[in-house]
Structures are given as structure tokens and as C-alpha cells.
Image (cartoon, helix red, strand yellow):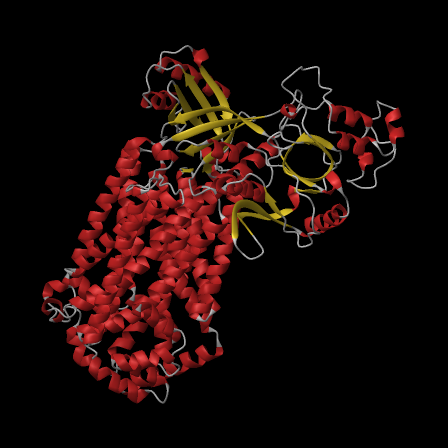
Amino acid sequence: MAKSSPTKKAWRSLSWLGVIIVGLIIANGAGVLTGGGSWTPKLALDLEGGTQIILAPKLESGQTVSSEQLNQAVSIIRERIDAAGVSESEINTQGGQNIVVSIPGTPDDATLNRIQSSAKLEFRPVLVASAPTEDSVGADGSTATPTPGATDDAAAPETDAAADPAAETPAVAPTDASDLNNITPALQEQFDSFQCSNIDTSVVAPAGEPLITCEADGSVKYILGPVEVSGENISDATNGQVTTQSGATTGEWAVNIVFDGAGTKSFADVTTRLSGLEGAQNQFAIVLDGSVISAPRTLAVITDGKPQITGSFDQDTSKALADQLKFGALPISFTVQSQDTISATLGSTQLQSGLIAGLIGLILVVLYSLLQYRLLGLVTVASLAVAAVITYLLITLLSWREGYRLSLAGVAGLIVAIGITADSFIVYFERVRDELRDGRGLVSSVESGWKRAIRTIIASDTVNFLAAAVLFILAVGNVRGFALTLGLTTLVDLLVVALFTHPTLQLLARTKFFGDGHKLSGLDPRALGAVYRGRAQFKPSSEVASRKGSSSSKEAVKRQTIAERKAAELIGTGSGKSTDGKDS
Amino acid sequence: MASFNQFGNDLHTGKLSYNIVGRRKVWYLAAAAMILIAIVVPALRGGFTFGIEFTGGSEFVLSEISTQDQDAAATAVTDVVPAAAPRVSVVGTDSIRVQTDQLTDTESREVRSALATAYSLDPAQVTSSFIGPSWGQDITGSAIRALLTFLVLAGVVMALYFRTWKMAVAAMVALLHDLVITAGFYGITGFEITPAAVIGFLTILGYSLYDTVVVFDKIRENTAVDGPESRRTFAESVNLAVNQTLVRSINTSVVAVLPVASILVIGAFVLGAGTLRDISLALFIGMLVGTYSTIFIAAPLYAQMRENEPEIRKRDKKALALKAKAAGTSPVADVTHADITA
């Protein structure tokens, strides 16, 4: 039993590995067939070039942009781009005025919008809503009649305030943002003549004052009260499909907002007030960059601080808005000043040299492994080859699904990973050799050496993976790309050593060449100190004599049969995990 | 090769043993000296040189060019300012963008005319401006936050896995040693610290701890097997573990350093300054120092930290007494163990 079971397990592990590789190839093939995928990974800015977008701030005359504002904008834009995938963009300021964004590939309009729009979100109560003025005819004939109902509403209360047409301040101080006293005669006049095509998104009205604006598609124009809740109070934003109460999706995309404590409270206050009002005043306008995305009627009081914004969203636009809201509004609005393709900064020679260097390094590693481990070195080489294949497929997949781009630093990281991957094999082989030196047969040396090695490999790989995960989650920019590469190679290392190197060795241990310890096998017990075998058998008896009671049990563990040890380790505290890891 | 096998065998049995843990004062002194050099020399040289990605720099845009040859621009810049590290790219179809380290006004003017000459343009067709850092404070800040989080988490994971916080502390000290020395190397040679170099540092961070965990796992195993009744003192158990993993350490560092060295040689001598050199230099130094510090700093430090625990003291006393007895009564008892203390 002890003989057949590891063999069976070995074949099972190898088949799993085959399944994984074939699965990756199929997934990638599907990507290629459906478009978007490719058999080669996409390259980053430094190797392939991309697009350089120069963003100029929208400034009114006399207004200047401070370096803090620029830096803040750079950091927000970077977060927005990072949220779209791991593309290693390059963003910097230029001449203390502009922002230069370099991204790989050619951006579409959605990407440009994601980068440049300010995304200043405000919730304002609707005071007056009316059909928009015809703005196509008569530039001066802007006295088009607003809907009577709306004007009446606006003009009816405190009509005496209209006595002074120049009044910039309300005659009666408004009690809250929904109070129609917010509408001064001057504002009313401005509203009457307002044309939806005139919206200037770069100038957003001060938060404390009413705002005249239109629905984003120009279908309705509004007078809105002062800001009740603003985007600064958003703690998180996600996108998703709207679900009905029964849980079915309606197919409509929405942005779900989570407010922080202050935002939740004011949102609850406002919805309480609005739900008691009627007509247009019952509506709560969601204003993005000066235009109204939607102005839903307030049907219920929202106390959990988790409103949902619907509008004419699709999956991409809702995701983009959610990302924009999450990272905050840009302190200033920008326009695209120029957009040009840009060639690679490093050129093809660097990549070529890097690959040549990697190849030379790989050959050296192979030679050294053969020198050190003889034919066992071939197992290292084969394992590295398997690791390379899996890593390549994963990177290609990631560059299709997650927008990962391989930069020169990434290539260097992959080459470096050769060493860390090979270390797992070295740790393993050395453990097997240690067991051989202790006088075991090869088959049992492989089993017990593996059990000790996998513990070490898992522990050390955990540290590496931890580094990768933390850096990927917390860091931004180039560091994230690196973290992805590191985490990927660590996982592949674990996968290959468990599903390829160990099973292969298990099978090889049963061949005559390795089992008999041929001189060239790298596992020749004679070369590994078979001369000590007699001593090793002799030594324990003297040691046991010198020890008493439980302390000798640990030494005894070394001489248990595999089955005994396996049973003992399952009971043991930490080792149960490593047994599982190996068996799977 | 047989001799290397023999070397490994002898290290495993203890026939051959380097007294690494015992001579810890020597290693501490060496480490202190290296760290001092790594801090003082760069400080005297005026700190680190940061690349254009960190400091910002000058940018020249050549418009209406007739050729898209990028090398001419690089040569024109380095002829005027050899250390400017130009990055050249073609923008659109008829202009070239050259980014360099921050230049003085005079240099800037000279570079402008050199570029104009190189592409037979009118100097007015070459505009120059200042560009801000692409690796700004926000990236540095987030990277440092991530780093600290990682160190805390890694410390906790190691303390849990090894069931002693002392191993975690010893590993962290060794890591610090590696980072200071690697960074010091950049300071001493005056190589620019670029994002590629920073990524190299981060790799070292993982590698150094990784290497320490591998060796500490053997130490944990040995010190557990050598129970309180062992003939070896605690320090000797640690020392044996270090010796037994020495072959692994040598093989691993050779295998890890070979590809890095080949990138470094090609990167530095064939291509000159650039991403490949920056990243591989940090890795090359860091990997060597990382392997070294595991053996010569982390392991002795761990043994020292544990030595003063009452239980370990008791055990060491017993082991020493046993040995004294063995030496007195039957000197042939165990050659292996006697050698370890030598």
C-alpha cells in the first residue's frame, strides 16, 4: 500500500497540473477568439509607447491654479486610472500649469472622460422645474414662457420680494434649502432667460447658493436650492444593476453610494423634509459637474446613508462614475489640450537586451543545477519550464482581463523570479539528501524530505505573498504592477513544486536509475555519505540511552515509518496543514 | 564536485562546522561598520541622487522634425550634460520629446541649441519647460504605508509560525541591515534612485525575509529536536542548523544571483544607465547581503536573544556539564559534538 499510493497520488497531481495548464490555454484561446485577448501579453508605456494627453485646467480670467491643486488632481487622476486596471500609467505636471497623462494604448472617449471630468457631486433640492427654453431661435428672444405652474410656484409666495427687481438677497431669509424664499427676483429673471446650452460646467455655483441648471440631456431646467449633501461625504461608491424587491435585476445600471456619518445624517434630514413636500419640491436633484443627472422624487426617508443613483447608465459609465466618486472630485476641471501617440521611451533594444540577459541567466542556472544535482538538475530545469509556461499564460490572461501591462521592470522581476522559484527545488532536494544521509531509502527519503520541505516552502512563500498582497492593495502606480508580478510568481512557484516537482521525484524515485542511486542521478547515497549509514544507525542507540522519557520521542519521529509519521503529524499542531497542502 | 558533496555531507553530520553563532561579536562589528559606512558616506556626498521620476526635470519638445531618429537627441543631450539621463520619445508624427534631469538655465539653453543643431531646426522650434515628478509624494506615501503594513503583518505571521516573537525580531533586524546597506550602495556610488531601483528594494524586502524564514525553519526544527536534555547548548543547535542549511544558502544565492548578474552586466556595460541596471543593481547587492545577513546576523542574534531565558540557561548548563563529563571520562564519546564547539 505504501508503495502504490504515492505513485497514484503523483499521477493525480500531474493530471491536475495538466488540467490547469489546458484550462489556462482554453481561457486564453477563448479570449483570442472573442476578441480582446491575445497570445502575447500587452506591453507597458516604456516598451510599447501609448498616448500622451495634455490636460489644461479650465480657468476663468485672472484665476490661477496652485501647485497643491495640481498635485491633488494628479493623485486623484492616478487613482481613477489605477481603478480601471493595472496599466502603469505615467502622470505628471508640466510647467506648473498642465497635467500630462501618458497611458499605454489609445484611450477611447470613456477613458478620457474618466480622466478629465471633475466629478463634483452635489445633492440639491429642486425648487422649480420647467421645460427648457428654446435656445435655437433668437438669441435675444430668451423670454420664452416657462411652464406656468412652475413660475407660479416660484413667484407666488412673498410676492413683495419681487418689488425690488435688483434684489440679490431674499427679502425673507429662507428657513431651509427647500424654501422658495431662496429664489430672488434676480434669480428668477436669470432662470427665465436661461438656456440649457449655456451651462458652464467649469463654474459650479457656490454650495450655499441656489443653482440654475438643466438635466444632462437638456430636457428639463431647474432652480435648485443650496447644496444639502456633497460628494465629500461619500465614503464608498460601487456600481451594480438595480434589483427589485424580489431580488430580480432590472437590467438598469446604477451607482450605489455609501455616505459617511455626517453625510448619512444630513441625507436622512433632507429626505425627511422633502418627502413631506409636493410637486417639484419633492424632487431631490443629483448634480454632477453642474448638470443634473437625475432628480428623483423623494418617496421615502433614507436613513441608512446608502442612496442609489440611476440615470442613463450602462455598465461602463456607472463604473466610471463610481470610481470618480470614490476618489473624490478634482479641485479644478480640465480640458484635453492635446492628445498624441507617443513612442516607447526605452525602445526595442532594451527589451531585447533584457531578454538576452534573461536567457543567459537561465542557461547559467541550468548549468549550475546540472553541476550540483546531476540529472536531478533536469527536474529543476523541467520545473522552471513548467513555471515559465504557467506564468506566461497567466500574464497574458491578466493583460486581457485586468489591463495588466508588462514593463521592463516587470520583465526583470520575472527573470529574478527564476531564482526564487528554483530555491524551492533546492530546499526540497537538500531535504531529500539530508534524509538519504540519515540512511533512508530513496522512496521514503523523498516522502519525508518533502514533508519537511513543503512546510518551509509554504512558510517562506507566505512571507513573499504577503508582501505582494499588501503592496498591491495599498500602493499605487508602478508598485502595483510589480506586486502583481511578485504575487503571481510566488503562487506559480507553490503550484509547480507541489504539482510537478514532487510528483516527478516520487515517480523517479521508483526508477532503477534513481532508485539505485546511480552516480549521475544526484541522489547517490554513497556520494551523500552512505559511509555514515552504519554510524547513523549506531548513533541513535547511544543518544536514546543518554536521553530520558519524552525528549527522545522527537528523535524517534525520525525513524518512524511514513504511515506512522503521517498519523502522528495529523494529530500534531501545525503540521496538519502542510500535509493537506501536499496531498491536494 | 565530489568535494562539494563531501562538503555538504560533513556540514550535515557536523564533522565540518563553522562556528558562526559563537563568533557573533565579529559579525556584529562588521555589520555596524558597514551600516555606518552606508549612512555616513552618502551623507558626506550630499545624500541620494533621485531620478527625474522623483524630482521632476526639464522637457524639450522639438516640432516639425524631418527624422524620427531618437538616438541623435540622446547624444545631443549627453554631449552637453553627460549625467542628464535623457528619455527620448516620438510624439505624434513630427515631434520629439526629450525629458532630462533638472538642468540649469545655461545648460538648458545649450541643450536647446544642441538639439536644434542635431535635427537641423531653428532653435525656436525647440521649446523647453519644467515637468513635475511622475512619482509624486502620493506614490511614495502610499508605498511607505504599504511597507509598514507589510512589516507588521510579516512580523506577526513569523511570530505565529515560529511561535516566538524573537525570531521575528531577529529577521526584521537582518532585513533592516540589508536595506540600509543596499540603499547605502546607491548613495556611495551616486547611482540615481529611480522607480526601477525602488522596485528592486521592494523585491529585496521579500527576498531577505524569505531567505531568513528558510533558515529559521531549520533552526526551529533543530532546537525542537534537541530537547532540554540535549548535549548541545542552544547556541550550538542553532549553529548546527545554520551549517546544515549552508549548502542550500550557497546554492540558492548562486541560482538567484546568476540571472540578476547577467542582467546587471548587460544592463550596465552594454546599455548604460537605465531600468535594467537600476533594478538589477539593487537586487544583486540585496540578494548577496540578504543571504549573508540571515547566516551572520539573524541566526546569531536569535541565539543571543534566547540564551538568557531561564529554561535555555538550564539546558545550556546541563549540556556543558555533560560535555565536561564526557571529555573527562571517555574522550572518544562523540567527535561530532566536540567539533561544534571548536
Which residue is the extreme one toward the top?
B122
At 39% from the left and 16% from the top, the residue drawn is B114
Q: Nearer the viewer, residue B279 or A204?
A: A204
Percent position (x, y) of residue B97? 41, 23
Q: Is the C terminus of chain A in the top left, top right, bottom left or bottom right quadrant?
A: bottom left
Q: Is the N terminus of chain A in the top left, top right, bottom left or bottom right quadrant?
A: bottom left
A127 relative to A431 in the view: left or right = right
**Splitting the image into 4 quarters, where does residue B41 fall?**
top left
Percent position (x, y) of residue A202? 63, 28
Which residue is the extreme one toward the front?
A148
Q: Image height check: is A562 above or below A210? A: below
Q: Image height check: is B118 above or below A469? A: above
Q: Image height check: is B249 above or below A231? A: below
Q: Nearer the viewer, residue A420 or A508?
A: A508
Percent position (x, y) of residue B287? 34, 52
Q: Could one spot residue B14 in this view of the protein?
A: no
Q: Could one spot residue A213 in this view of the protein?
A: yes
B15 relative to A284 in the view: left or right = left
**Splitting the image into 4 quarters, where does residue A535 fall?**
bottom left
